[in-house]
Amino acid sequence: MRAVCLLLLLGAAWSARISKDMASIVAKDAVQVPETPDRDFIDEDEDVLYHWAVVIAGSNGWWNYRHQADACHAYQVLRRGGLQPQRIVLMIYDDLVRYHDNPKPGSLFNRPGGPDVYRGIKPDYRGEDVNAANFLAVLRGDAAAVANVGSGKVVGSGPQDRVFVFYSDHGSPGVLGMPTGGFLYADQLLATIRAKREADGYKEMVMYIEACESGSMFEGLLPPDLGVYVATASNAEESSWGTYCPGMEPGPPEGFDTCLGDLFSVAWMEDSEWEDLRALTLQGQFEAVRARTSNNFTYNMGSHAMQYGQLSMTDQASGNYIGMENKGWAPDPISPATPSASSPAATLDPATRVWSLMRIIKWIAHLLGLRPDLQSSSEASAAAVAAPGSSAVAAAGAANGGSGSRGGGAGGSKRERPRAKHAAVRQRDADLEPLRHRVRKAKGDTERAEAQAALDREVSKRSTIDATAASLASALLLSRPAGPSLMAQLGWEQAAVLAPAPGLLSTAASAPNSLKPGAKYVEQLVGSSLLGRTAGSGKAVVDDWECLRGMVAAWEGACGQMDQYAMKHTRLLANLCNAGVQPAHVRDAVRGVCAGSKQAQ
């Protein structure tokens, strides 16, 4: 007992001094940017020259805090991994660090208790420069298209280079959102990738996509021979999920009334910070992320992470794209390599001090021949405390990616990946969390009434949007000649679809205004994948992309811009295109539905 007390006293006395030294050592090891600016890190393939990346958040505004936090965190992971800043293109609206609701001006956080991921950030494109056209120009390496725009930086990769792309925002069938301008359509993204491939613009490319229905951007579209591997947060029909939201455990600190991250995004980034990416394969990381994104395959709060493209690439080390200098857990996984003694990187949190103390005690015990098992028990516990999402850390077995991990990594470390079980919320519902949080935290009746009124307005707006979609579907089913043709294409019997309006006796020959489409048919047309285009079918969400763009233009011309909630109804518009309905028919019908008012939403 005296020996143990002596060890604790000695460890406590030395921990403050040694932990400061450790902070410097770990921070230096966290980046290790090579002195030669032309090369970054050594790839598995010695013929690879450079590693490029595009990181983009497709939203703005306080409600969407998590998307820009995801993007800035991804930038830090890539820099820590050894990618050079001149070959990382960062596109964020960049409004949050100065936002009036931000309790920590100048900072962004992607997990509770985590580091400031905005530290050292210099966006290449911000504000209105973050749009689909500029993103595609950056990806294809078209410097002329972005001349005098932002930094003008593009992905100037060649046939011996690897490219990594990360996107975080809202999505819907066939499209990804952008903070300005129109949607990014799946066919446009695929055309850009094809053109870059044909121009020998990359050796291989990996894309991680965080968005609702993100699988619809690639299913039935991305072939396995373009040298592109894609992992998405969800399949072609479901929502992706936000996390670290107010009221959750773990949740954001006091003063933050918005979600800090997205489940798929924080899963791959925290995994990248925790694991040795020289040893962890892309498949190994996917299995880890899939387990966490699905809430350990229960899917009661989560989505189906998916893979597309050239799946043979997944036996490569994930460090080939995310950075080989990501060698395992570090207390402060942010890019500056040599923090000063007064910088945040040199201040270790309590969990890290516990970890440091245990290492000191283990060392002293080893010298004295005492408690030889102290490292395995105490250090493992401390590492679990300090790990991201450490409220629960599950075992990292073969089912969670062990089969996709090469060797044992540097030093043969067996530390477990974070497998935190924590709450999540659907992406579109996550946008309501700030409003709900303000209602819960309101002080006094007046403040609570104002907060509730703001929440009610947003819910009412969404109800109006959904009613618009349902009314459009009903109007088209009743219209001529579009209606009969639409029902025939869908294999629906007209007599079954069209029922007499309430209070009226009618026959099929009755006046159109005496009939009303059955609710289940309207619901299917609005919200279901029809004509065999369900998730996993291998079919694209739509074949005629010009038709889908025309449908979106028709909606927006009559009802206003399809915002991050209204965009969910591209499912309806895709169904109409696949059934042969023309944008002109939708334009005529939607004008009546919205009464020509763009304020209907």
Image: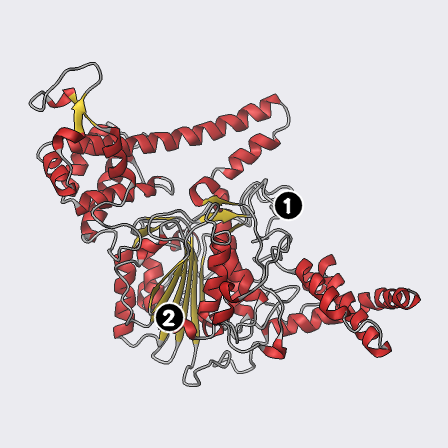
Q: Is residue 349 visible?
A: no
Q: Residue at x 64, y 45 (%)?
A: 253
Q: Residue at x 44, y 45 (%)?
A: 427
Decide: is 84 above or below 9: below
Residue 205 numbered tag: 2
- How is the rendered protein coloured? secondary structure
Q: Give percent across and percent down for residue 563.
A: 36, 41
Q: Give percent across and percent down for residue 332.
A: 64, 63
Of all residues shown, which one is farthest toward the left?
509
Residue identified by numbered label 1: 253
Residue 303 numbered tag: none
Q: Give percent across and percent down for residue 116.
A: 61, 56
Q: Quadrant of the C terminus?
A: top left
Q: Amino acid at mark 1?
A: Pro
Decide: is 192 above or below 156: above
Residue 584 left/right relative to 114: left
Residue 109 left/right relative to 565: right
Q: Quadrant of the N terminus?
A: bottom right
Of all residues shown, which one is farthest toward the top?
503
Check contact, mark 2 vs mark 1: CB within 8 A. Answer: no
Q: Residue at x 47, y 74 (%)?
A: 317
Crowdedness near tag 2: few (<14), some (14–19) or many (≥20) residues, C-alpha within 10 Å: many
